[in-house]
Amino acid sequence: MRCANPVDLETLVAYWLGEVPEPRAALLEEHLFGCASCTRRLEGLAALAAGVRAAVKEGMVGMAVSAPFVEAMQRAGLRLREYRIEPGGSVNCTIRADDDAVVSRLRAPLGGVTRLDVMRVHGGGPEERLADVPFDAEAGEVLLIPSAAWLKTMPAFTMRMRLIAVGEAGERPIGDYTFNHSPS
């Protein structure tokens, strides 16, 4: 049966994350207990979250993340290797067999930036653009996690990244970063 008053996706996500305040949460729970349609949507969201969690834990995906996400990974007991790099800098890096993930902390002056893109190229491959990545302007950093599964299979290579501020006036480079990867 279809729901006459379906719960919107944003509210379902907030409920799943425990971000719906009382008494709204109690009303929402009452609706969910009585509505098979909305309950199925919530179950689908839970299954999606579990799949994403498993893909991240297994190192199958790469992504730009927030500092609280990295902290949650640490609290969950994941073994992280972190590299901090300043604009114009380079770092020798690797991933070991027992590492769950590598976190690249790109430091940058991000005050006033409203949208940030990352251009990256590795080896002789094509340039890739990651559009509108999350960043923390106050902390002055962008956190990137490459796919650990992919990284563990790679021979020695160099990856270059460029942070680009995108705004009404156009684009401007914020910083260039070089990662010299060596297999472990």
Image (tube, grey):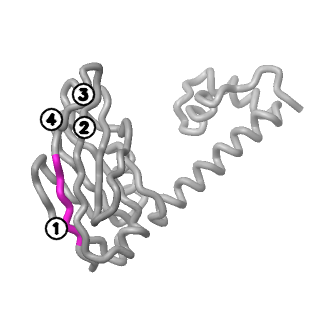
Q: Which residue is mark 4?
A: 109
Seen from this angle, which residue lies furthest left?
88
Q: Which residue is mark 2?
A: 164
Amino acid type at circle 1 is: Asn
Question: Crowding at label 3, few (<14), some or many (≥20) Cα neighbours within 10 Å?
Answer: some
Mark 2 / mark 1, whichever is N-terminal = 1
Residue shown at 24%/27% (left/top)? 113
**Mark 1 vs 4: CB contact within 8 A:** no
Amino acid type at circle 2 is: Ile
Q: Which residue is mark 1?
A: 92
Image location of residue 138, percent across then percent down: 21, 32
For residue 151, which numbered disc appears in the image? Answer: none
Q: Where the C terminus falls, by quadrant?
A: bottom left
Q: Which residue is mark 3?
A: 113
Image location of residue 22, percent across then percent down: 58, 24
Mark 1 / mark 4, whichever is N-terminal = 1
